[in-house]
Image: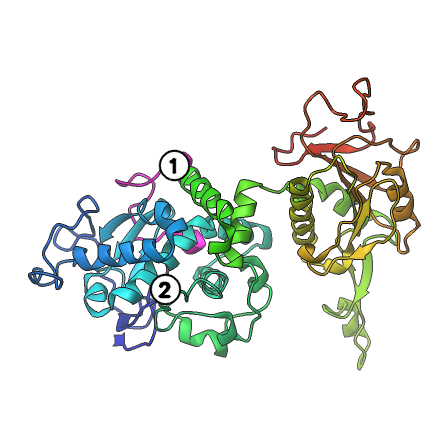
Amino acid sequence: MSRQVNGPGCGPGRGPVNAPDAPGARNTPRTPDAPDTPSAPDTPSAPSAHGTPAAPGALDRDKLFAARLHAARVRPYLATALFALHTVESRRVPTMAVDRHWRVYVSPAFVDRTPVEELAGVWVHEVSHLLRDHHGRGDRYAREHGLSGPAERLRMNIAADCEINDDVYGEGLVKPEGAVEPRLLMLPPGELMEEYLTRFRLGPRTQDFAWLDCGSGADGLEREWEFGPEGAHGLTAQERDAVRFRVARGITGRPGDAPAGWRRWAERVVHPPQPWRQLLGAAVRSAATAPGVGEDYSYGRPSRRSASVPGAVLPSLRRRPPRVTVVIDTSGSVSDTELGSALLEVAAISRAVGGRRDLVTVLPCDAVAPVAHPLCRAEGIPLVGGGGTDLRSGFTRALRARPRPDVIVALTDGQTPWPDRRPPCRTVVGLFPRSADVSEYDDEYVPDAPPSWARVVVIGQDSGGR
């Protein structure tokens, strides 16, 4: 059964489409008579509406690649990624879709009926799924939350589209008709896929997007019409990472040309934050098992004992993420770039505790620690300092807070004295990379190594740590 929709079947665009999971939907098997065939190299090969009409039913490559060229002109920082995609002509997809191996599957009929300007928007939309690693993030989210089935993958696809579409269009790039936007689901703009997934469920507001399918590149679930890892013209993991890094460097080199969402993405690629979820994992387990720490009563999930008390709803005892105080070294030896890296780590720590910004406090410190800032947005925290370094005052200030933190994270260049005693909470020290000549004031000065009771990681490197 076919139905007309005002939106994309596999990416932003326009119907009609076949709803593959609807009753009576036609799902053409892959047979020698009707294959999905890999295209020739991505160069115009058949005359099109821009010249002589193409053969009936054939993919209008001139029009498709003209749209890609237009996308590269209005979004030059994405050009490397756009031209890394390999085109596959397919009648199994209603519009356009991508797999995790950087193949883009294109419907000839969709190209014929869609204006070049809108096709350019679809190109950018689809490659954005791959650059932002929505397939890998979707797989991780599904594992961590025990999610499975096509309904949850549809929800991931919708959330991924909301992350992309809130600021990607405009300034020469036309928004395709029917593009999913956060406002259509009564959601705030500017959030990540994982944050959107906590804010909505499938229901009346999402029923108009039940057909949405941007391919495995959007949610990680491989489709039967995709070529898979053994198919031709897929990029290797190293090639995919190289494309992402090159695009990210292009954005950070000219940050004024890119929307805020792309700038945040590029900063994470160029400077990957530490895996704070794993680094704080021991603190989470400790907080969950220590009596009175990491536990609180909540009515969010009533206690099973409520059944024995008619007319009453009893709260249940729930685990909470740890309270984290981040002490940031703002002394004169720490550069502005390193302070920017510290704010990226603060944002990553906030995500690691489930987005509970009320559990994260930031404490700028040089020789003194004047003010502790509750976390609202990492970008808005004033990092005041520029004097000498003594993080002991930061530790003292953090431990005087009530309630006391479960974890203290110190982000520093290491040129500081350390507390004589182990704090009564877990401690993680993030070191900014330094060469051997560590002091600009005293050539004979050798800073104390971080204490043995702290977990030590190097910011911007893999968390080998100790």
Q: Furthest residue to the top?
A: 444
- Image position of 447 with respect to 321: above or below: above
Q: CA distance from mark 1 to mark 2?
A: 27 Å
- For mark 1, what is the residue? 239
Question: Mark 1 or 2, which is nearer the eye?
Answer: 2
Please check the rendered image and state whether residue 229 is part of the magenta-colored stretch, yes or no: yes
Q: Residue at x 28, y 41 (%)?
A: 231
Which percent across, then down, holds residue 448? 83, 25
Labels in figure, total: 2
Left or right, 115 with respect to 134, comes to left
Residue 150 appears in which quarter of the rendering?
A: bottom left
Q: Residues within 10 Å of mark 1 (few under 14, many from 20)?
A: some
Display coloring: rainbow
- For mark 2, what is the residue? 173
Q: Which residues are magenta?
A: 214-238
Which percent across, then down, holds residue 9? 33, 66
- Asked whether residue 438 appears in the rendered view, the answer is yes
- Image position of 273 with respect to 314: above or below: above
Q: Nearer the viewer, residue 131 or 155?
A: 131
